Amino acid sequence: MPVPLSTNRRRQRGYNQAEAIARQVAGRTGRLLAGGLRRVEETGAQVGRSGPERRAALAGAFAWPRGRPPAEVLLIDDVVTTGATLSECAQALRAAGSYQVHALAVALG
C-alpha cells in the first residue's frame, strides 16, 4: 500500500512516487496493490522541519475512511527521514483494524 500524497502535491507532481514503487513491488511479488488510505490533512512540505515539527504537522493527517483495511499491510514510501509519515500511516491503519503493519522505503534521508 503506497503512502498517499495530498491532492495538491499529486496535482503538482502528476503522480505519486510511492504508488509507482508499490506497483513495481506488487508486480514482482505477485501481491495485491491495496489502496484506501487517505491523507485527510494538507500538511505542506516536510523538508526543513525537525523530527518533532514533522510529527506535530502529520498528527491525524491520515485515515482509513471506510470499512476495514487489510489485516496485514506493507506500507511503501520513497524516502524515510524521521519516520513520522510512516508512523502516522501505521497508526491510522491499526486504528481502523489492521493488526500488522510493515514499512518499506527506497531511501533514507
Image (cartoon, rainbow, N blue to C red):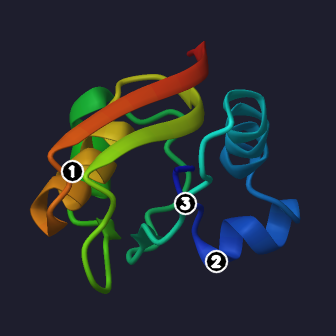
Marks 1 & 2, CB-CB < 8 Å contact: no
Closer to the chain start, of discs 3 and 1, is 3
Q: Amino acid at mark 3?
A: Pro
Say which quarter of the image contains residue 13. bottom right
Report the residue marked by disc 2: 7
Describe residue 28's horizontal placement relative to residue 84 as left or right. Answer: right
Say which quarter of the image contains residue 59. bottom left
Q: Amino acid at mark 1?
A: Ala
Report the residue marked by disc 3: 4
| Residue 18, horizontal then vertical, whole percent | 67, 44
Circle 3: is it few (<14), some (14-19), or many (20+) Cα within 10 Å? many
Q: Alpha carbon of mark 2 to alpha carbon of mark 3: how far?
A: 9 Å
Q: Is residue 37 shown above or below 105?
A: below
Closer to the chain start, of discs 1 and 2, is 2
Q: Secondary structure at mark 3?
A: loop
Residue at image point 70% right, 51% down: 19
Residue at image point 14% right, 62% down: 97
| Residue 9, horizontal then vertical, whole percent | 69, 65
Report the residue marked by disc 1: 56
Q: Is residue 39 shown above or below 101?
A: below
Q: Is there any visible trace of residue 101 in the rendered image?
A: yes
Can you tell which of label 2 and label 3 is closer to the viewer? Answer: 3
**Residue at the extreme front:** 30
Can you tell which of label 1 and label 2 is closer to the viewer? Answer: 2
| Residue 77, horizontal then vertical, whole percent | 57, 37
Q: Alpha carbon of mark 1 to alpha carbon of mark 2: how far?
A: 20 Å
- Pick whichever, 31 or 92, lies toward us: 31
**Residue at the extreme top:** 108
Q: Secondary structure at mark 2?
A: helix
Can you tell which of label 3 and label 1 is closer to the viewer? Answer: 3
